[in-house]
Amino acid sequence: MNEDTYELPDGWVWKKLGEICEKAQYGWTTSANFNGRGIRLLRTSDISSGIINWDTVPFCDKEPEEPQKYLLSKGDILVSRAGSVGISIEIDECPKAIFASYLIRFRPKSCVSSRYISFYLKSPYYWNSIIDNTAGITIPNVNASKLSILEIPLPPLFEQTRIVAKIESLFARLNKTRQSLAKISPLLKKFRQSVLAKAFSGELTENWRAKQKYLEPASKLLERIRQERKKRLGKKYKESEPIDTSDLPQLPEGWEWTTFEECCLLNPRHSSDIPLNTLVSFVPMPAIDAELGAITSSETKQLEKVTKGFTHFIEGDVLFAKITPCMENGKTAIAKNLVSGIGCGTTELHVLRPLGGILSEYIYHYIRQQSFRDRAEANMTGTAGQLRVPVDFMKREILPLPPLKEQKEIMNRIQEFFSQAFAIEKSVKIAQAHCEKLTQSILAKAFRGELVEQDPNDEPAEVLLRRIKGN
């Protein structure tokens, strides 16, 4: 017994994979043809999900002279030696198909259940063996010879059948749980979008608003913003075009329709008064996490090295990815914790700097709406693969503006609802991780002989092997 084996129940025996299967075989070398017909060509990419969709499996560009040598049959087990190295799948029903050269076929002998071996090749014992074991197998170098000397714990044939049935029963229950958990994330995504829709229609704070004795109307906020813009822009200042509200929904009392051009500075540049040796944060596109909607990493550089040819922003600015697919994926963030309060980054960002005390979080959540991104996508310009949201779209985009005090209440309520959603997501991830641990625990018990009871009347595996060998 080598260091990777363990004591087995009575009637069980350790056998090498190559001893209980026909000789391992590599597949056929040819290109895939997605527009052809004839014999299908099963590849590593076709088995990596654990389920084969035969409708998407391509055909052979060149078929072997002896196709029978490579044709797949029910019960064949394929192991990948490239790409997703070590993954395996058991062939169930299949059309006329052969397997590609980066797959290795093992065809179990009659004394062994194919499904039993298939489950073993998903167990923690198998993965521990191919990562680092006495056979010298490592993930980048799985081949037929090394896989053939893997030690497999082999029970009596009838017990193999009972083990497989028990695993399938337990896995069916686990899969139902996984499916239920998988439905929660899309629901939470819809929930968040619903919260945002209610927030920017005024519905989220309707009851709160009714209890307020006085709220400074957004019209006064906009007037202050106009005065601020005049100071900042000087001779470049232009009065905003009047907004046609005839087709827009009615806003709550005290709210106003505005545009990004009116309430924000769009893509401002740093002041020339900042010393060029100032250390600042540099933010490439990968540093913005689309799911979190935040800058998750940055580099520190001198301003003189990143001031030309890059986007400029400061603490509190809202960053919006303008290029496909980053925009559609939701790459958006509020610039926070910048070195010296100053940042530069990828040119594929629009920068929104709220004026008049408008909350950055308000603008941030507004552009995190799917409805906003849908409008932005519809207005993209450029060539395929290089489509961008133009600055003119950002300028004329219309948004509802509530009083400042109500903005703060809206943000509090969004945060409250989003915190609840985050807590649910965290619980779902814990449950999903538990499912994976339980899966591995079931397999570990199965191959130690602890999942089903042994039957003393079962013919020992060694006796069965000797008889088959004798025949």
Image (cartoon, grey):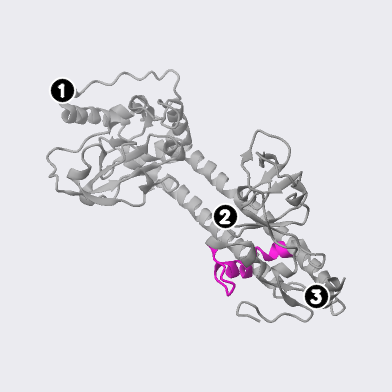
Instruction: Give, as a three-letter code, the residue at label 3.
Output: Ala
| 202 displayed left or right of 449 | left
- Say if 460 sits above or below 40 in the image: below
**Disc number lying in front (1 or 2):** 2
| Residue 95 location (% of width, % of height) | 76, 44
Furthest-front residue in this view: 65
**Picture disc at residue 235:** 1
Residue marked by disc 2: 82
Query: Which numbered disc, 1 or 2, marks the residue that appears first in the sequence?
Result: 2
Q: Nearer the viewer, residue 368 or 119?
A: 119
- Could you tell me which secondary element the residue under label 1 belongs to? helix
Query: Which numbered disc, 3 or 2, marks the residue that appears first in the sequence?
Result: 2
Q: Nearer the viewer, residue 410 or 100?
A: 100
**Image quadrant assignment for residue 239:** top left
Magenta part of the chain = 117-139
Query: Label 3 vs label 1: CA separation?
Result: 92 Å
Residue marked by disc 3: 461
**Disc number lying in front (3 or 2):** 2
| 202 displayed left or right of 216 | right
